[in-house]
Image (cartoon, helix red, strand yellow):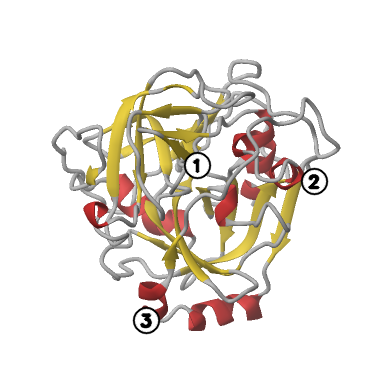
């Protein structure tokens, strides 16, 4: 990942605990949904051979406009944290998962060896663009009513310059060194914010959800568990980030890496509402988790953003505000 990041929110799979209105399937303003047919999903499964997984390019974040408009026909500017009621959903432990306590991580990316829920709910995304190129990002399972969601970056779902939604989109939870320990889940729907395309890729809106089809009759959440997620959450807290960076120091995209730190606001771009930490994960980590209230023993926490942008020695995530909540409600309805 080259430069991008986001806000603070949390949610986890298990019993869904709301402090706001229940999830609704009604269309939401500013939400773009792309539905993927069963035939297209079958094609995606056949397409992603082991050889294609190995040859996929780790995706960097594209250049982005620095200042979003104050309002747009796509739904206006995303609210800053604290301007709406906080909404959070708790994590869902993986079936039969055993947690191990890891050593403290340094600020630079280090291999995650702690196991726990993050080792099953983090994974790699693979997709193809219209030109035939194959690419890899990161994503994380988020709790929802349908137990079928992952949070990732907008630029891992749609080309902000053209509006092209990527195809042959799959998620491999727990990916490690080419292994698919829990199988390959295909996307049945992809959801992104209209603002992301309307602003030509402004990183404040660089988030997306994918709804995954069941595999062998089981939902994604029932298979691997899910992290919690929070919207309109407090900022400036200790957070942990996880992704599959593609540099040699990060294992060439073949292992899950970890950073931690107290987040601070992005002061480098006018109009930015992003928050970040003193760490940089490289191409392929885009879309990976930023987790608050992370418990190293269980490997669980609350998603508050996705790895989006890096600048200098910092990586940033977009804030999960009211518009992200609308997107989540649309994507997470059963």
Which numbered marker is on residue 168? none
Q: Position of residue 317 (x, y in %)?
A: 49, 35
Kindly identify which residue carries mark 1: 308
Q: Is residue 123 left or right of residue 317?
A: left
Residue with the mark numbered 3:
51
Position in image of residue 308 (x %, y %): 50, 42
Q: Residue at x 41, y 55 (%)?
A: 284
Distance CA(mark 1)–CA(mark 2):
26 Å
Q: Secondary structure at mark 1?
A: loop
Figure quadrant of residue 319: top right
Does residue 244 appear anywhere in the picture?
yes
User: What is the distance, in whole Å, between disc 3 and disc 2 at their CAs?
Assistant: 39 Å
Q: CA distance from mark 3 to mark 1?
A: 27 Å
- Residue beneath the point at 30% across and 70% down: 178
How far from the left and from the top, in percent, is residue 62? Answer: 56, 50
Circle 1 Cα neighbour tier, 10 Å, few/some/many (<14 / 14–19 / ≥20): many
Identify the mark nearer the N-term, 1 or 2. Answer: 2
Specify the label residue 27 is tagged with.
2
Tell me which numbered mark, 3 or 1, is placed earlier along the sequence: 3
**Please, is residue 256 above or below residue 99 in the view?**
below
Q: How many marks?
A: 3
Nearer mark to the viewer, of 1 and 2: 1
- Position of 103 with respect to 238 (left or right) is left
Contact (CB < 8 A) between labels 1 and 2? no
Residue at the farthest right position: 73
| Residue in view at x 72 percent, y 48 percent | 197
Above or below: residue 195 compared with residue 76: below
């Amino acid at each position: 990942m080259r430069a991008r990041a986001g806000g603070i929110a949390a949610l986890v799979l298990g019993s869904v605990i709301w402090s706001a209105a229940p999830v609704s399937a009604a269309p939401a303003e500013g939400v773009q949904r792309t539905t993927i047919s069963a035939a297209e999903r079958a094609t995606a499964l056949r397409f992603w051979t082991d050889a294609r997984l190995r040859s996929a390019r780790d995706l960097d974040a594209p250049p982005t406009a620095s200042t979003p408009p104050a309002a747009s026909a796509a739904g206006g500017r995303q609210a800053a944290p604290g301007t709406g009621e906080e909404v959070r959903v708790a994590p869902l432990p993986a079936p039969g998962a055993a947690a191990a306590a890891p050593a403290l991580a340094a600020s630079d990316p280090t291999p995650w060896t702690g196991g726990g829920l993050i080792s099953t709910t983090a994974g790699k995304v693979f997709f193809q663009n219209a030109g035939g190129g194959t690419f890899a990002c990161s994503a994380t399972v988020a709790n929802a009513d349908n137990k079928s969601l992952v949070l990732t970056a907008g630029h891992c779902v749609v080309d902000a310059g053209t509006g092209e939604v990527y195809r042959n989109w799959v998620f491999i939870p727990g990916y490690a060194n080419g292994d698919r320990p829990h199988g390959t889940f295909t996307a049945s729907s992809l959801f992104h914010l209209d603002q992301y395309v309307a602003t030509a890729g402004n990183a404040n809106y660089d988030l997306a959800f994918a709804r995954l089809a069941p595999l062998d009759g089981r939902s994604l959440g029932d298979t691997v568990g899910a992290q919690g997620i929070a919207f309109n959450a407090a900022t400036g807290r200790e957070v942990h980030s996880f992704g599959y960076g593609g540099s040699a120091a990060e294992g060439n995209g073949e292992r899950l890496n970890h950073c931690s730190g107290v987040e601070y606001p992005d002061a480098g771009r006018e109009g930015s509402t992003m928050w970040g930490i003193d760490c940089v994960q490289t191409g392929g980590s885009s879309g990976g988790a930023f987790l608050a209230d992370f418990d190293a023993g269980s490997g669980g926490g609350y998603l508050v953003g996705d790895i989006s942008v890096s600048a200098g020695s910092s990586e940033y995530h977009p804030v999960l505000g009211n518009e992200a909540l609308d997107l989540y409600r649309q994507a997470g309805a059963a």
